[in-house]
Every structure is written in C-alpha cells, then in structure tokens.
Image: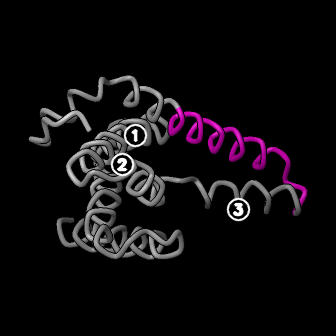
Amino acid sequence: MSVRILWEFLAACIGTVAFALLFQVPKKYYGLCGLIGGIGWICYEIFLLWCSAPISTFIANVAVVFLSRLFAVKKRCPVTVFLISGIFPLVPGAGIYWTAYYIVTNDLEQAGQRGFLTLKVAVAIVLSILLVFEFPQGLFRKLSGNTKNT
C-alpha cells in the first residue's frame, strides 16, 4: 500500500507541475506547486478511507488552500500561483466526463447520481477555499516567519 501511495503522490506532483506549466507559473515555483498538489491528493486518499468523496475533498482542499496561502506569504507572491495548480488533482474532471457520458448514452439515472456527486465535490472545493480565506493574513505571516507587513 505504501508503494502505491508514493506513486500516487509522484503522479499528483507531476500532474500539478504540468498544470502549473500550462498556466505559466514561474519555474521557481514548480516544486512547491507539485508538493502542494501531491499533499492534497494524499490527504484525499487517506480521508477517503473513512469519509465520503465530498468530505474527503473538502478536508484535502483545506490543506491545499492552507499551504497555498502559507507559501504565498513565504515567497511573497500571489496565492493563485499555488492554489490554481494545487487543486488540480482534486477537481472532479472524471465526474464531469462520466456525467456527460451517461447523458449521451441515455442512462439518466447514472447521470443524475454521478452529476450530483460531482456537484457535491465542486461545492466542497468552493467551501474549503472560502473557509481558509477567512483565516487572518497575520496567521500566515507568523507561520511562515515573514513578519513584514508588505
């Protein structure tokens, strides 16, 4: 099991870096973007053992947003540099695909089930972003060791 988790972590890191490349994130941030995406995916996989997919996504994305804000303060750059690429492994792209597939194949019951699950995951992502952005900026300054106000 630990080898599988390591491979998934590496795959999430590489996928996140590839996504950061597409969004023209500066090269010096690729490693941190990959780390954030990988940690988010591992959190998702671990909590998926005990929770539903939306709850697991919420918890994992809280970690992603928290780390994104922390590294943004530490590196003095916009949080979106880390956040947009970091949530990439958690975005329910397969859920959207399967919802569309079931609609096209006229399996509306499956489409409804998959679509509703995908919607719940998407709402979990939004709510986790809103939650962590309510934390005061000073908290991230203290945690990163960056005490300057600018």
Instruction: Find the distance from the CA under tag 3 to the CA under tag 2.
Output: 20 Å
Location of mark 2 (residue): 44
Location of mark 3 (residue): 97
Q: Left or right: where does residue 149 sit relative to residue 117?
A: left
**Upstream in sequence: badge 1 or badge 3:** 1
Q: Residues within 10 Å of mark 2 (few under 14, many from 20)?
A: many
Q: Residue at x 12, y 32 (%)?
A: 142
Question: Is there CB contact under 8 Å for labels 1 and 2?
Answer: yes
Find numbered disc 3 in the image and state the secondary structure of the residue it sits on.
Answer: helix
Where are the magenta residues, as a range? 105-126
| Amino acid type, callout 1 | Ser
| Amino acid type, callout 3 | Tyr
| Amino acid type, callout 2 | Tyr
- Image spot of residue 116 (x, y percent): 69, 38
Instruction: Find the distance from the CA under tag 1 to the CA under tag 2.
Output: 5 Å
Find numbered disc 2 in the image and state the secondary structure of the residue it sits on.
Answer: helix
Foreground of the two, 43 or 88: 88
Q: Left or right: where does residue 52 sit relative to residue 10?
A: right
Location of mark 1 (residue): 56
**Upstream in sequence: badge 1 or badge 2:** 2
